[in-house]
Structures are given as structure tokens and as C-alpha cells.
Image: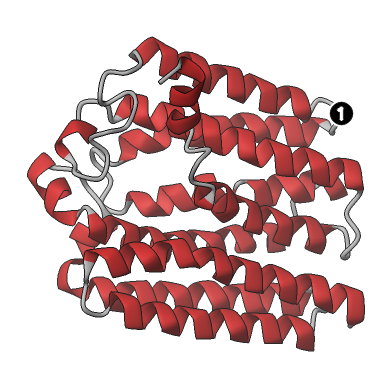
């Protein structure tokens, strides 16, 4: 396998679910910040930048976890873990992609650039939170949702309170879906001494996931309502709630493959929320 193909796998370009889980919150924020009509150039910058930063985060995550991943069934064949590429290559790929994403936002205002620095720091430090933080998925939610304050900054030149509440909603959502993901690796993580929400919540893991879904959707609903969004938006939240209930049917028996399926299916929950927002601005 040539190097480009290995780098392709390193940044999970063959698994776009991660990009989508970052992209939906960014799109929520762009639509809300712009009243439903984001500028095409700003939209393009954020969509491409989201893909680049997620890819960079995957590379640095694999570098940070290179000594752990070889002991986890799901990750043992990753390019860095299996020795097909070197550690410095992963760091180089992460740096190139992060620089490319920063170059993308050069046309935007100073506040957006300042927030991008915070976003890079959060994304780069997340892999190490699994060493000591009981619920690293909450920190992941900040990393995956930092496009929210950046989008408001880019559109409005400021970050209003509603943007930070949307970020809180995203944190709850990330704890929900990434706990389901962590349930897949729980046995391996316990042996390695890693910290995850699936381990921290223990036998209350399913209940915690559903409570986090509920908190996320409730906060999201209040944020949209405060911005004047109404019935199409509410319908989107209702569909997302139905999807969350479907996830309960997948995770309640803690079957590994069904937990992984629930994690991946969160793409549709994020999409439902975005469609509700977009339709309300277009038709409301």
C-alpha cells in the first residue's frame, strides 16, 4: 500500500462520520447566526475547514494513542499502530492539515482567527484527556462543537450567549454518542487504564446516554426558540428525539455492534436538527 493510501486511512477519509458529526453543529450555527442565509464564501470556508481539522485531529489522536491502540481490537490495524507509517509522519500530516485550515480563515475577521487558535489547542489536547479525565467525551464535545462560536464570530463579529448555549447542547450530544462508541471498547479500555464515560457511568451508561440526549435537545430547542424559530424547527427537534429513542433500542442490551451502529446513526440526528433549522428559515 502506498503512502498516500496510508495517510488517507490515517485521517479516516474513508470514514466520514467524524466529519459529519463536526459539520452539523457548524451548519446549525451558520444558519442561526445569519438568519438562514449564510454567505457562500463563509459556508465554503467552514465546510472545508471542518473536514481539514477533523482529519488533522485523527492524525494527532493516533499519534497520542499509538502505544494503546495496539492493544484494542478495533484499532490494532491502524496505519501508525501497525507500523506502516512512522510517528513523525502522523505529526507532519496533522500539522499540514491544521495549517491549511488556518490559511482558509485568513479572509475572516480577527475574532474568528483568535477562536481558531483555541479550537486547535482543544483538538490537540483532547487525546490526552483520556488519561485522567473521567468523562473525556465532554471535552470532545467542546472540540467537535467549537465551530459554533467561530461561525457566530465570522458572521456577526461577536459570540452571543446563544452560541455558548448551543455549544453546551453539543457537549451533551457528544457525551451521548461517544459514550455509545466507548461502550464498544470498554473491556479493552479497562485493561489499559483509560478513562471513558462508558466506564465512569458503569451500569448507568444507557440511562446517562438518554439523559444527555434529552438535555441536548432541550437546550437546542430553547436556543432556537429564543432566536424566533418555530414549528418547522420544533418538528426537526421532534424527529431528532425519535431518532434518540431508536438509539435506545440499539444500546439497551449493550451489544457491541449495535452500540457502534447507534454511534454512526447520530449523523441522522444532527441532520434532522439542521433540516428543521433550515426549513424554518426558508418556510417559516
- Say if residue 172 shows up in the picture: no
Above or below, comparing residue 71 to residue 206 in the picture: above
Helix, strand or loop under label 1: loop
**Count of labels shown?**
1
Q: Residue at x 42, y 48 (%)?
A: 139
The answer to whether 234 appears left or right of 38 in the picture is left
Image location (x, y in percent) of residue 225: 74, 80
Above or below, comparing residue 20 to residue 81 in the picture: below
Which sits in the foreground, 279 or 138?
A: 279
Query: Label 1: how many residues lie within 10 Å, few (<14), some (14-19) or many (20+)?
Result: few
Q: Residue at x 8, y 45 (%)?
A: 191
Q: Residue at x 46, y 59 (%)?
A: 174
The answer to whether 53 appears left or right of 137 in the picture is right
Which sits in the foreground, 136 or 16?
A: 16
Tag 1 residue: 107
Q: Residue at x 54, y 18 (%)?
A: 95
Image location (x, y in percent) of residue 70: 19, 32
Q: Quadrant of residue 184?
A: bottom left
- Say if residue 72 shows up in the picture: yes
Image location (x, y in percent) of residue 113: 73, 30
Image location (x, y in percent) of residue 4: 51, 20
Which sits in the foreground, 8 or 58?
A: 8
The answer to whether 25 appears left or right of 68 in the picture is right
**Which quadrant, please, contains the C terminus?**
bottom right
Q: Quadrant of residue 254?
A: bottom left
Amino acid at each position: 500500500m502506498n503512502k498516500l493510501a496510508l495517510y488517507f486511512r490515517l485521517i479516516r477519509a474513508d470514514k466520514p462520520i467524524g466529519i459529519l458529526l463536526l459539520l452539523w453543529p457548524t451548519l446549525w450555527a451558520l444558519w442561526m447566526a445569519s438568519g438562514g442565509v449564510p454567505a457562500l464564501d463563509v459556508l465554503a470556508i467552514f465546510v472545508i475547514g471542518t473536514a481539514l481539522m477533523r482529519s488533522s485531529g485523527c492524525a494527532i489522536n493516533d499519534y497520542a494513542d499509538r502505544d494503546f491502540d495496539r492493544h484494542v481490537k478495533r484499532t490494532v490495524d491502524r496505519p501508525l499502530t501497525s507500523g506502516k507509517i512512522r510517528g513523525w509522519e502522523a505529526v507532519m500530516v496533522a500539522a499540514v492539515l491544521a495549517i491549511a485550515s488556518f490559511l482558509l480563515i485568513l479572509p475572516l475577521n480577527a475574532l474568528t482567527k483568535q477562536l481558531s487558535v483555541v479550537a486547535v489547542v482543544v483538538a490537540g489536547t483532547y487525546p490526552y484527556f483520556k488519561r485522567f479525565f473521567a468523562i473525556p467525551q465532554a471535552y470532545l464535545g467542546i472540540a467537535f462543537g467549537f465551530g459554533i462560536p467561530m461561525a457566530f464570530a465570522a458572521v456577526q463579529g461577536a459570540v452571543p450567549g446563544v452560541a455558548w448555549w448551543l455549544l453546551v447542547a453539543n457537549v451533551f450530544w457528544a457525551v451521548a454518542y461517544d459514550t455509545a462508541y466507548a461502550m464498544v471498547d470498554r473491556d479493552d479500555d479497562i485493561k489499559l487504564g483509560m478513562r471513558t464515560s462508558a466506564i465512569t457511568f458503569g451500569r448507568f451508561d444507557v440511562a446517562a446516554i438518554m439523559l444527555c440526549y434529552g438535555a441536548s435537545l432541550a437546550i437546542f430547542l430553547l436556543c432556537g426558540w429564543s432566536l424566533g424559530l418555530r414549528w418547522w424547527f420544533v418538528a426537526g427537534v421532534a424527529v431528532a428525539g425519535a431518532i434518540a429513542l431508536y438509539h435506545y433500542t440499539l444500546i439497551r442490551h449493550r451489544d457491541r455492534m449495535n452500540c457502534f451502529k447507534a454511534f454512526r446513526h447520530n449523523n441522522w440526528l444532527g441532520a434532522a436538527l439542521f433540516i428543521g433549522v433550515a426549513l424554518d428559515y426558508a418556510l417559516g
